[in-house]
Image (cartoon, grey):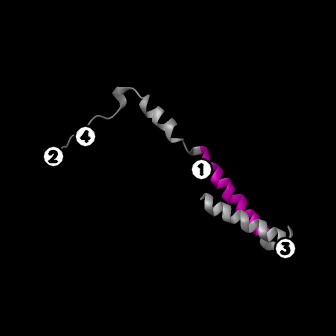
Amino acid sequence: MSRDLNNIRRLFAKLQLRYGDDDELVMQLKKELDAREALNQDRKQWSVPYREFIKLVASRPAATQAGPRTSVHQ
């Protein structure tokens, strides 16, 4: 999503320089850019860095960790 967001930012900057802030297309693109940035921010808040996730899993008590799987059909 980062590449898409960067492309929209570049397009917005080009159109803003060419047509100004009062152009209808520039205002519409600004709304889309704001919406995408808000969505991207929400995703970042829910993401957990891999190292922190591994520490969290490793710190779980052994009793709550799943053991080896056994087949019901033997």
The residue carrying mark 4 is 69
| Gap in angstroms between the C-alphas marked 4 and 1 | 33 Å
Decide: is 8 above or below 63. below
Of tags 2 and 4, which is closer to the observer? 4
Tell me which numbered mark, 3 or 4, is placed earlier along the sequence.
Answer: 3
The N terminus is located in which quarter? Answer: bottom right
Left or right placement of residue 45 versus residue 51 in this view: right
Tell me which numbered mark, 1 or 3, is placed earlier along the sequence.
Answer: 3
Tell me which numbered mark, 2 or 1, is placed earlier along the sequence.
Answer: 1
Q: Which residues are magenta?
A: 27-45
The residue carrying mark 3 is 19
Query: Dot 2 lies on which element?
Result: loop
Tell me which numbered mark, 4 or 1, is placed earlier along the sequence.
Answer: 1
Of tags 2 and 1, which is closer to the observer? 1
Q: Which mark is residue 73?
A: 2
Of tags 2 and 3, which is closer to the observer? 3
Q: Which residue is depicted at the point 74% across and 63% down?
A: 31
Tell me which numbered mark, 2 or 3, is placed earlier along the sequence.
Answer: 3
Q: Amino acid at mark 1?
A: Arg
Q: Amino acid at mark 2?
A: His
Decide: is 13 above or below 55. below
Q: Which residue is depicted at the point 39% across and 26% down?
A: 61
| Gap in angstroms between the C-alphas marked 2 and 3 | 70 Å
| Gap in angstroms between the C-alphas marked 1 and 3 | 32 Å
The C terminus is located in which quarter? Answer: top left
Do callouts 1 and 3 mark residues in contact (Cβ within 8 Å)?
A: no
Q: Which mark is residue 43?
A: 1
Q: Which residue occupies the foreground of this view, 74 or 44? A: 44
Residue 66 x, y percent position in the rendering:
32, 35
